[in-house]
Amino acid sequence: MSSATSEGPGFITTKLEQAVGWARKFSIFQYPFVTACCGMEYMSAGASHYDFDRFGAGLPRFSPRQADVLFVVGTISHKIAPVLRMVYDQMCEPKWVIAFGVCTCTGGFYDNYATVQGIDTIIPVDIYIPGCPPRPEAVLDGIMKLQTRIQNQKQAL
Amino acid sequence: MAAAAPAHEVRNMLVNIGPSHPAMHGVIRLIAELDGEKVVKVEAEIGYLHRAFEKSAENSSWTQVMPYTDRLNYVSPLINNFGYCAAVEKLLGIETTERCKYIRVVMSEVSRITDHLTCIAASAMEMGAMTVFLYFMKAREFLYEIVEDVTGARLTISYGRIGGVKGDIPQNLGEKLEAALKKVEKELSEVDRLLTRNRIWVDRTRDIGILTREDAISYAVTGPMARASGVDYDVRKAHPYFVYDRMDFEVPLGEKGDNYDRYLVRMEEMRQSIRIIRQAMREMPGGPVAVDSRGQAIESFDLVDAAKMGRTAGFVDVLTTVEPTLSGMERPFHDRVMPQDRRVVLPSKDDTYSNIEGLMNHFKLIMDYHGICPPQGDTYFAVEGANGELGFYVVSDGKDRPYRVRVRPPCFFNMAILHKLLEGYMVADIIATFGSINMIAGELDR
């Protein structure tokens, strides 16, 4: 800026990587892979009382090609596990995964023949939100943790 | 050169909808055969959320089945809880207290409202009415606050106990509930104005997905779906349980059995549920909450510390206080909502913490192989779930674990008739009709 007066337009300096991280963390397009009970709390967290749109994560995209973050919400049984893997593989980089609810984290109390014991046995997970189901506050906390992670990671440019 | 048109085969198109599709609730797959835009044939594939309910129930004690029942129909978990409790109580031959029956009725109806709200919200959203979704989620949130006040959790509550409920309701619940119901009524009338005479909504739902009365009966469809087709069957009226026979309410019936009727029936049922809640709260018996005057109450951990050092003189009838998280489970409140049956009912928390009889009783019921052991036999008990007749068939071999807990999930029968509701209509109607069925995968696949 040529103008040196204090009223003139200012400027900020930043690293390209940080700027990209800042932009990415506030435009989270999510793919809700909703299967079970946690979907109810997911709906609550998305509706007006809790509203995760405040964190730039308000728009669900139901096409994996358009999504950045895969929300795995609810129990993943062995029958639906290949579908989850296929959806994950179809997403474009950079992509992140949130394991929503204890069933996706560890299998929860469904320790039986039908349930996948944690989705991290199928796909990599960035953020685990435990709870059965997690309260909407916990969901918001998880989204903020993901934002920090997106901001601080090495950006693929 | 009259060219004969190249002989090509005209085939119907197969379209696969789901399992990961926003309108299929994540866990169901429809294989639709289309002739142009017309649906010729539909096959539904289910089982994507099979979580081995029956196997898990076999491996837990009678009380430990409770959390699994929460997650059957996770939109109205309280009804599932009480249905299972009532089935085991029938097997044991015990009856719960009057106050507990009223609490069960109130909480069941709160749950029914949340279920219908979610159903209409989701199906309206799938047809593009996002506002309805936001309004009804707001209304549901008010009710979740009530559920949280009473049970301590928002969704998976495990509030039922065999013989009663976890604890008494908070003392100021009446006012809070009334305030919440007022807000829910406001949202209901708002959505009523938005949808009921809305041209787009009526066009998308009127005369679509017609279920005839005969089909509804022959496929054992129950609940709002059957009532929309004119089948006058409501478990609350046909086989009254708890205190539904004392409640004054009406069962709304539809005429055509199309999507619009199902919507109207659900809306009216919510209003009737509000009516039932108000009556039950008014008539709920207080029962004695004895204010104990046997001296100064002491903290339970002080009492335990003193007892460890042998200073037990005068401990026979001492009154203890328990932590606030156990509120509603103190002796006076406990006695109001739980029957006096030591084979089944855990003692109140002050008894557990302050005297040896209570502690032993607690241990006997909690320890493996010593818990609740119903006599050998089997029984079936049905309650009116939000989607229809929700039945529990429980079998006991006299041990502390169920031999079998079989659920009659209302959704399963509603899904069995899905193909009849879709075939012959347009492909765009699949979403509208499927939304009006209110398929809940947890109880469909178990």
Image: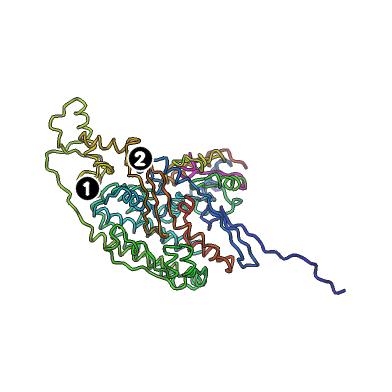
Name the spot of residue A146 as percent of width and height, x first.
Answer: 50, 42
On whether disc 2 and disc 1 are found on a single subunit, the reply is yes
Q: Is residue B127 visible?
A: no
In the picture, the disc for residue B400 is 2
For label 1, the residue is B333
Q: Nearer the viewer, mark 2 or mark 1?
A: 2
**Furthest residue in direction front, as rendered:** B376
Specify which label sits upstream in the sequence, 2 or 1.
1
Res. A155 image quadrant: top right
Can you say which quadrant of the picture contains the N terminus of chain B? bottom right
Q: Residue at x 56, y 57 (%)?
A: B44
Identify the residue at horizontal 21%, vertical 44% (top origin): B331
Q: Is residue A110 magenta?
A: no
In the rendered image, the residue lying farthest to the right is: B1
Q: Which secondary structure lies at badge 2?
A: loop
Q: Is residue B115 above or below residue B70?
A: below
The spot of residue B145 in percent (x, y) is 34, 53
Q: In the image, is A150 to the left or to the right of B135? A: right
